[in-house]
């Protein structure tokens, strides 16, 4: 944990202005610094731990767009449950290392903050892979990639994860922007944009093609859709809105809801929380894993826009 006191706070943040009041700096829990954004479009919170957006709410919306668990734990080596965690440089389990990699359990640094031409707010955080766990670096001495995340809060939310391969070798990485969306009720929402797309069902350990135009949810769901760049619409009649998720440089989309039983085993989710969240992740995983040549940069981008029904 970072020991944040008055001096540390200044060290973290002193180079960065408040952009005429758009930005403020705070702690969400002792030792866990966050950047708070409030501009003409929306409010948002970004955690330096994990380089993770925690919430985003356009002013005209009554509800948060991004779900953050009310039981989220702020502890070192534990990912924050909710927001948009970054899965990198692998997705899911990998050997003896923690699921979804280390980016979500590392403290990132602020690279820059600025006001965009249209009055939005852009924050860039960076992380060097030398911050990754020593165990991993010892067994992967040639791995040398840097990461930067650019979060732009404006009429829509845009998140870009940039990986640069600084090593002399080609490296294989997976990445995912593991967005948790806040929904009114998992039983009444639907997802459009995955018809006729092949997926790997992690629960059945098998591949299939999704035939239907609308995906609805009646049970635990954990699917990796492959070879798809499609835009996704998450229709939520209960919140009277559609969330549109578009992406660039992403060939996989992951859909996940743990349902009642699995979420009851999670210490960082309250009993009924699974009803109000759905993960739709822009990713490059499984056979869409990336091979980055020496010196190559990859930018995974997702944009999230919300439209209220008239
Ligand atoms: C999803 C995976 O992306 O993340 C699931 O497809 C996994 O299999 C889920 O359970 C949550 O992972 P974690 O490590 O944050 O509990």
Image (cartoon, rainbow, N blue to C red):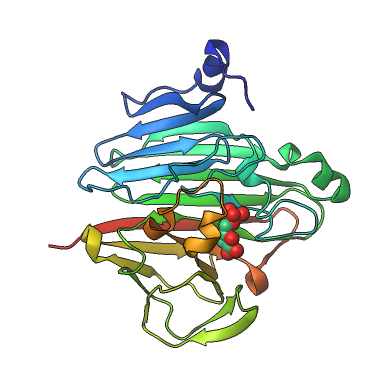
> Which residue is located at x 42 percent, y 83 percent?
195
Where is residue 168 shown, x and y percent of the image? 82, 53
Nearest the eye: 8 or 63: 63
**Would you say 234 lies left or right of 167 here?**
left
Name the residue at the top extreme. 7
**Would you say 197 lies left or right of 238 here?**
right
Where is residue 42 shown, x and y percent of the image? 29, 41
Nearest the eye: 83 or 173: 83
Residue 210 drawn above or below residue 79:
below
**Would you say 198 lies left or right of 213 here?**
right
Where is residue 204 shown, x and y percent of the image? 61, 79
Quadrant of the snapshot with the C terminus: bottom left
**Would you say 152 lies left or right of 142 here?**
left
> Which residue is located at x 47 percent, y 30 percent?
34
> Which residue is located at x 65 percent, y 60 percent?
91
Where is residue 152 shown, x and y percent of the image? 40, 44
Quadrant of the snapshot with the N terminus: top right
> Which residue is located at x 37 percent, y 50 percent?
157
- The image quadrant in which ligand 1 is located: bottom right
Badge count? 0
| Residue 204 visible, this orientation | yes
| Residue 300 visible, this orientation | no
């Amino acid at each position: 944990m970072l020991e944040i006191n008055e001096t540390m706070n200044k060290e973290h943040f002193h180079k960065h202005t408040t952009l005429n009041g758009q930005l403020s700096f705070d702690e969400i829990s002792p030792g866990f610094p966050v950047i708070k954004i409030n501009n003409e479009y929306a409010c948002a919170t970004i955690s330096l731990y994990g380089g993770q957006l925690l919430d985003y709410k356009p002013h005209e919306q009554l509800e948060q767009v991004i779900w953050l668990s009310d039981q989220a734990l702020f502890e070192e080596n534990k990912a924050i449950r909710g927001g948009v965690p970054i899965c990198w440089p692998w997705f899911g389990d990998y050997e003896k290392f923690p699921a979804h990699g280390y980016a979500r359990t590392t403290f990132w640094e602020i690279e820059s903050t600025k006001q965009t031409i249209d009055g939005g707010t852009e924050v860039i955080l960076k992380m060097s892979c030398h911050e990754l766990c020593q165990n991993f670096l010892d067994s992967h001495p040639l791995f040398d990639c840097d990461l930067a995340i650019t979060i732009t809060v404006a009429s829509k939310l845009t998140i870009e994860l940039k990986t640069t391969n600084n090593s002399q070798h080609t490296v294989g990485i997976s990445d995912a922007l593991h967005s948790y969306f806040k929904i009114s009720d998992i039983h009444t929402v639907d997802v459009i944009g995955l018809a006729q797309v092949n997926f790997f069902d992690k629960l059945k350990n098998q591949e299939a093609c999704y035939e239907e135009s609308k995906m609805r949810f009646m049970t635990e769901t954990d699917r990796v859709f492959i070879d798809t760049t499609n835009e996704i619409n998450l229709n939520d009649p209960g919140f009277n809105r559609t969330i549109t998720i578009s992406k660039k440089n992403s060939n996989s989309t992951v859909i996940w809801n743990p349902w009642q039983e699995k979420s009851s085993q999670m210490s960082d989710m309250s009993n009924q929380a699974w009803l109000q969240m759905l993960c739709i992740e822009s990713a490059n995983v499984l056979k869409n894993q990336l091979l980055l040549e020496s010196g190559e940069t990859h930018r995974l981008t997702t944009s999230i826009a919300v439209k209220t029904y008239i």
